[in-house]
Image (cartoon, grey):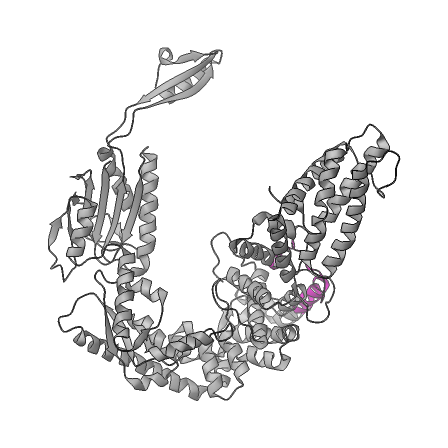
């Protein structure tokens, strides 16, 4: 079947926009083809430094003729209704079809040639393309990321003729800007297009460019006994910078290797798009990576080399290119050395003082005030995670200091990391330096979670302060917008808790003892530390300004009293409280995390429905429930639960269910009824004991013992007996079974 090939050839497209552009082109083309009534077998898009390409296979030559039947008014309807229907359909009364007293319009639509519909579709895509940034050039009205030079458009091997802002379509494109000598060439179809592009030194598919870079970079390193430092983000970026990527190994001045390796690597990556290199012998470091030193590989000694990806094949093997890039890198690293040396002269006292003048948020005070809050909260958390409170407070007070350093000002990505280096250089304990270095972690779903107690305390304090502060000023995430990364912060808290086994409850009313923490209390402490009043002095009249000190004092006192009454230490903060939706937010984030891990959403909801508030326990419950339902006993017992629930629900609609003890030994009582009564009582005792011990597998085992007596009961016993006493006793028995199972999870929320 016919093929559509579209290429929009332009000046350089920024690498960071290419992947998104390919997705947008696929979406926009799919939407418009569907709207036109066209079907296809495959649709593929490609993005590169100078071109966006679309190829659609299996399109029909034309859309089929269509006949649509539209239901109209009844024959007895008022004349006005008929007139409106005729205007809508464009038909006359005699063209309508009458069937069973109802009028119908039969609209016939002739098919259209696919080639005739393509020009309008392409123009809609080009003019409505959602580039993050675009430009207009010349005297036209067209906007694109960079000036468009050519449009190639072929359908079934023939040019689809049209023009957009004076740019006419054709069958011609261009190869590599330099290696291809910029000579245009014609193509017949996609296979010919792709082949000729490669002959003219252009790899169309970004996956091919990525693989070429990786394999060639690894080879130039291996030939010298070196190894490439993996960096998937940089690999993706440079694959969008070169149409014919050619990795070249360059030399770096060894004197720069005494800088922190993260500084060297980031300077290479950020400014020059170079890959860092290390000696092959250093790869043994990878074997010793643990959760606590997961960045050890990055911090292992680098080799005095780098890999640059050129867009040409140099005749001298790239020696001149490598030498020129080496000089540029030396200049960049000299800047980094200046920051490194100067920062160590300045020190933490000066940086902490500087934070007093840095606004964290207009409603949440300065960075220095935030540091005070984090330090107080870290001291509160420390005993709960096995850390020393004094060290936790010290580390928290130093955690944000490097934000005022020259190095972090140049490389914001190194915040925390540089603080760790500067603390070690200043003689602070390694545990404090590590806590500062890692307190931002985890920063994403795949980032390493710290396990050192001191780091956990500071990391939790940092994230809790941010969450509580922004929720307090009603800066909550909405839809896809999360400008303060609060979803990431909540996920970080949850992962710190779960992966370190911290017993953290969301809504425990009582003060907990031992190592089990109370997030409700910690949230209240974090909220208590937030600024309590913001006064806009510019809007006050002169008399009000004179009375401002008294008003502020009164306002602070009133707010403090209100907070103490509303959020006393250790009190319950409801999930539905508008001011403290942060707790509900935690619950929602935990659900998302569990679902992302492959946990069934209905099982997550079934456990959450119990009102359990301990994060570790919730996860264990879900895992045990999932394993139980995967067994025959679990699946059959779930079916029995649903049958019992349906019976009870129907009876509840009629009136109140009978209450009281289940009777055994009644006259003519079936053995199956007696067996289930004893089994339910035994299961209740076993389940309670297992839940008290938090042995959820044992709780499921206890429930599994109900499977046989429940099946036998429903097989042999008629619940709705004509004898009221028998009926009431059996309903009470089913209620007991439902209650026992309900202590483990709300089985009514489970599908299947």
* Residue 580 visible within the image: no
Residue 638 placement: quadrant: top right
Residue drawn where x is 70% and y is 54% of the image:
699
Front-lying residue, 596 or 99: 596
Residue 146 placement: quadrant: bottom left
Residue 211 among those drawn in magenta = no
Residue 292: image x %, image y %? 51, 74
The quarter in which the N terminus is drawn is top left
Front-lying residue, 486 or 86: 486
Residue 689 placement: quadrant: bottom right
- Position of 342 with respect to 647 (left or right) is left
- Position of 619 with respect to 665 (left or right) is left
Front-lying residue, 511 or 469: 511
Residue 562 among those drawn in magenta = yes
Magenta stretch in the rendered image:
554-582
Residue 421: image x %, image y %? 45, 82
- Position of 460 with respect to 106 (left or right) is right
Q: In this view, does 320 lie above or below 465?
A: below
Front-lying residue, 398 or 165: 398
């Amino acid at each position: 079947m016919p093929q559509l090939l579209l290429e929009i050839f332009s000046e350089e497209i920024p690498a960071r926009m290419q992947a998104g552009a390919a997705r947008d082109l696929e979406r926009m083309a799919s939407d418009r083809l569907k709207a036109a009534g066209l079907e296809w077998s495959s649709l593929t898009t490609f993005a590169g430094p100078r071109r966006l390409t679309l190829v659609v296979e299996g399109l029909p030559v034309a859309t089929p003729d269509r006949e649509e039947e539209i239901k109209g008014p009844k024959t007895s309807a008022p004349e006005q209704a008929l007139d409106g229907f005729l205007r809508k359909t464009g038909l006359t009364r005699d063209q309508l079809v009458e069937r069973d007293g109802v009028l119908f319009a039969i609209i016939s639509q002739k098919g259209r040639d696919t080639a005739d519909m393509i020009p309008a579709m392409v123009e809609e895509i080009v003019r409505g393309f959602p580039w993050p940034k675009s430009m207009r050039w010349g005297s036209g009205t067209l906007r694109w990321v960079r000036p468009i030079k050519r449009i190639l458009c072929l359908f079934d091997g023939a040019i689809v003729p049209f023009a957009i802002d004076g740019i006419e379509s054709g069958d011609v494109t261009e190869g590599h800007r330099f290696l291809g000598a910029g000579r245009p060439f014609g193509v017949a179809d996609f296979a010919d297009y792709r082949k000729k592009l490669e002959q003219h030194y252009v790899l169309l598919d970004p996956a091919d460019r990525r693989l070429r870079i990786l394999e060639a970079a690894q080879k130039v390193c291996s030939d010298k006994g070196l190894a490439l430092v993996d960096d998937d983000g940089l690999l993706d970026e440079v694959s969008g910078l070169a149409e014919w990527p050619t990795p070249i190994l360059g030399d770096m001045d060894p004197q720069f290797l005494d800088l922190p390796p993260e500084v060297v690597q980031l300077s290479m990556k950020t400014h020059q798009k170079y890959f860092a290199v290390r000696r092959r012998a250093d790869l043994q470091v990878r074997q010793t990576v643990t959760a606590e030193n997961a960045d050890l590989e990055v911090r292992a000694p680098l080799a005095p080399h780098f890999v640059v990806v050129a867009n040409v094949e140099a005749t001298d093997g790239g020696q001149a290119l490598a030498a020129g890039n080496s000089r540029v890198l030396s200049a960049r690293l000299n800047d980094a050395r200046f920051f490194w040396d100067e920062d160590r002269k300045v020190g933490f006292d000066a940086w902490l003082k500087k934070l007093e003048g840095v606004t964290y948020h207009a409603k949440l005070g300065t960075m220095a005030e935030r540091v005070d809050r984090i330090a107080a909260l870290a001291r509160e958390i420390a005993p709960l995670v096995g850390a020393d409170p004094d060290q936790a407070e010290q580390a928290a007070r130093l955690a944000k200091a490097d934000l005022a350093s020259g190095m972090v000002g140049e490389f914001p990505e190194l915040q925390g990391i540089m603080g760790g280096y500067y603390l070690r250089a200043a003689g602070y304990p390694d545990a404090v330096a590590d806590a500062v270095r890692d307190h931002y972690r985890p920063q994403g779903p795949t980032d390493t979670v710290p396990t050192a107690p001191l780091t956990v305390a500071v990391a939790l304090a940092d994230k809790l302060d941010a969450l509580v502060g922004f929720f307090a000023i009603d800066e909550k995430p909405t839809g896809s917008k999360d400008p303060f990364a609060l979803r990431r912060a909540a996920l970080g808290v949850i992962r710190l808790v779960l992966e370190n086994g911290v017993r953290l409850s969301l809504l425990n009313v009582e003060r907990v003892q031992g190592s089990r923490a109370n997030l409700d209390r910690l949230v209240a402490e974090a909220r208590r530390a937030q600024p309590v009043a913001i006064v806009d002095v510019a809007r006050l009249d002169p008399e009000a300004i004179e009375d401002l000190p008294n008003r502020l004092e009164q306002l602070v006192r009133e707010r403090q009293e209100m907070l103490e009454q509303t959020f006393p230490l250790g009190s319950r903060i409801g999930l539905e409280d508008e001011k403290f939706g942060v707790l509900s937010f935690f619950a929602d984030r935990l659900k998302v995390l569990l679902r992302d891990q492959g946990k069934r959403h209905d099982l997550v909801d079934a456990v959450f429905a119990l009102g359990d508030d301990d994060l570790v326990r919730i996860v264990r419950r879900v895992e045990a429930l999932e394993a139980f339902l995967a067994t025959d006993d679990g699946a059959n017992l779930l079916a029995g639960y649903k049958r019992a629930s349906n019976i009870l629900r129907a009876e509840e609609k009629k009136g109140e269910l009978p209450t009281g003890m289940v009777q055994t030994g009644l006259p003519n009582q079936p053995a199956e009824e007696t067996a289930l009564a004893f089994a339910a009582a035994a299961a209740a005792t076993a389940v309670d004991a297992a839940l008290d011990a938090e042995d959820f597998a044992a709780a499921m085992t206890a429930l599994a013992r109900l499977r046989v007596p429940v099946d036998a009961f429903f097989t042999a016993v008629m619940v709705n007996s004509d004898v009221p006493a028998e009926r009431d006793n059996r309903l009470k028995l089913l209620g007991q079974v439902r209650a026992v199972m309900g202590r483990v999870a709300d089985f009514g929320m489970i599908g299947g």
